[in-house]
Image (tube, helix red, strand yellow):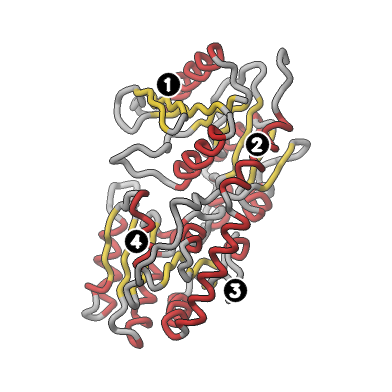
């Protein structure tokens, strides 16, 4: 079997990437280990073309065009030509892309086209209570029409995406993101007392603003508490920094405790477990997720985790059993969950132990890889069709 993933986010040293990139790197390695040939095609982070092999995965980073208004057209042509060249040499069975990834991609005979529902434009427009953009909405509709099957990373994303985009008469299966159990495992060193750790893109929908506001309530009872924020900055369309906004508008509200919030910048994936290990509690109060990787990663390390009660949060965390859920729009509730961890050390340890057991059972890479392979086998086209 030969799988070709379409993404621009496959991890590259020195460049930030999101959860999709982490997922594809993890699942691709597991598939290769099971005898599957995996190719990854997408734009390069730099203006040149590079081909490399990482963990047996053939990665084609293509030269990104920057023609204003037409970049999408030329980039799609470059990607399509590369897929055709790969297919002519070693026939591809399945092409997989994210929600808008098939919009302009021509389909080749003999290949099954799959969309993995990571959370697209319609999904987040609903969750953020904003209008669907005409151009992005059309792209997503065109992409969904081309797909022959779908994989949803959570029941929530499946249900809410299907409200806007038709999935009828095609196979749809929910398969969770996998967690690298070897990478995220307990580290035998004590946590830093009262240290709160957040990881993820520093943007509004990740709930970081409300988390900083929650620090006011946490510091009233635990003045030694600190918040370490790991992740890349988000920029507004005009280029303004979201972190700058937080420092300007939110940190002064902490009343001389601004130094208790530390923006640590992008953290390398290889040392992320060390940062989780330092935490007394890991907090991810996202306004919305399709599933989220950071919460189960920290859970896998036996850390007590505060996650969002919105969206698929309850699919990941059972409140009071494997972690805690919070109202991500309510700083006081976020603070209450954090303070509970500080106030109940023995119960917090039990949460962490339960959390790791839950992740091993439900997000195990071996189990997830087998689920993916089983699904792929049901949609592979017979040769000659």
Q: CA distance from mark 2 to mark 3?
A: 31 Å
Q: Of label 3 and label 1, which has the lower sequence position?
A: 1
Q: Are marks 3 and 1 in contact (CB under 8 Å)?
A: no
**Foreground residue among 141 and 179:** 179
Name which residue lies at 43% across and 64% down: 207
Q: Which class describes the residues within 10 Å of circle 4: few (<14), some (14-19), or many (20+)?
A: some
Q: Quadrant of residue 275?
A: bottom left
Instruction: Indicate whether 279 appears above or below 238.
Output: below
Q: Of label 4 and label 3, which has the lower sequence position?
A: 4
Name which residue lies at 44% across and 62% down: 186
Q: Of label 2 and label 3, which has the lower sequence position?
A: 3
Q: Position of residue 213 (x, y in %)?
A: 36, 74
Q: CA distance from mark 4 to mark 2?
A: 33 Å
Residue topped by disc 3: 321
Q: Quadrant of residue 13?
A: top left
Q: Of label 1 and label 4, which has the lower sequence position?
A: 1
Q: CA distance from mark 3 to mark 1?
A: 50 Å
Q: Secondary structure at mark 4?
A: helix
Query: Disc 1 vs disc 2: which is toward the camera?
Result: 2
Instruction: Indicate whether 125 appears above or below 206.
Output: above
- Let me know if residue 235 appears in the view: no
Q: Position of residue 237 (x, y in %)?
A: 34, 46
Q: Of label 1 and label 2, which has the lower sequence position?
A: 1
Q: Of label 4 and label 2, which has the lower sequence position?
A: 4
Q: Position of residue 256 (x, y in %)?
A: 21, 80
Residue topped by disc 4: 275
Residue topped by disc 2: 373
Name which residue lies at 39% across and 43% down: 17
Q: Position of residue 270 (x, y in %)?
A: 35, 49
């Amino acid at each position: 079997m030969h799988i070709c993933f379409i993404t621009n986010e496959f991890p590259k040293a020195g460049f930030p990437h999101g959860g999709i990139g982490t997922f594809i790197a993890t699942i691709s390695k597991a598939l290769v280990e099971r005898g599957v040939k995996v190719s990854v095609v997408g734009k390069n982070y730099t203006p040149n073309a590079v081909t490399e092999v990482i963990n047996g995965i053939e990665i084609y980073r293509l030269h990104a065009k920057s023609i204003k208004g037409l970049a999408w057209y030329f980039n799609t042509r470059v990607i399509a030509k590369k897929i055709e060249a790969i297919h002519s040499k070693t026939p591809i069975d399945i092409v997989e892309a994210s929600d808008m990834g098939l919009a302009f991609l021509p389909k080749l005979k003999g290949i099954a086209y799959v969309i993995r529902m990571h959370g697209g434009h319609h999904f987040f427009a609903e969750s953020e209570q904003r209008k669907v953009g005409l151009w992005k909405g059309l792209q997503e509709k065109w992409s969904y029409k081309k797909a022959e099957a779908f994989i949803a990373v959570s029941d929530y994303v499946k249900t809410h995406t299907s409200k806007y985009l038709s999935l009828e008469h095609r196979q749809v299966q929910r398969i969770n993101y996998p967690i690298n159990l070897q990478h995220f495992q307990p580290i035998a060193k004590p946590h830093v007392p009262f240290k709160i750790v957040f990881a993820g893109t520093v943007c509004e929908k990740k709930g970081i603003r409300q988390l900083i506001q929650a620090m006011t309530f946490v510091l009233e009872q635990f003045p030694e508490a600190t918040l370490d924020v790991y992740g890349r900055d988000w920029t507004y369309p005009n280029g303004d920094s979201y972190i700058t906004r937080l420092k300007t508008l939110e940190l002064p509200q902490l009343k001389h405790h601004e130094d208790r919030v530390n923006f640590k910048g992008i953290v390398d994936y290889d040392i992320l477990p060390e940062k989780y290990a330092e935490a007394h509690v890991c907090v991810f109060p996202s306004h919305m997720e399709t599933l989220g990787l950071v919460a189960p990663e920290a859970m896998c390390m036996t850390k007590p985790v505060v996650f969002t009660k919105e969206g698929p949060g309850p699919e990941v965390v059972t409140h009071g059993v494997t972690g805690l859920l919070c109202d991500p729009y309510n700083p006081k509730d976020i603070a209450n969950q954090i303070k509970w961890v500080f106030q109940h050390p023995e119960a917090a340890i039990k949460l962490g132990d339960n959390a790791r057991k839950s992740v091993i059972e439900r997000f195990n890479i071996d189990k997830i890889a087998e689920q993916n392979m089983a699904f792929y086998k049901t949609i592979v086209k017979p040769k000659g069709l």
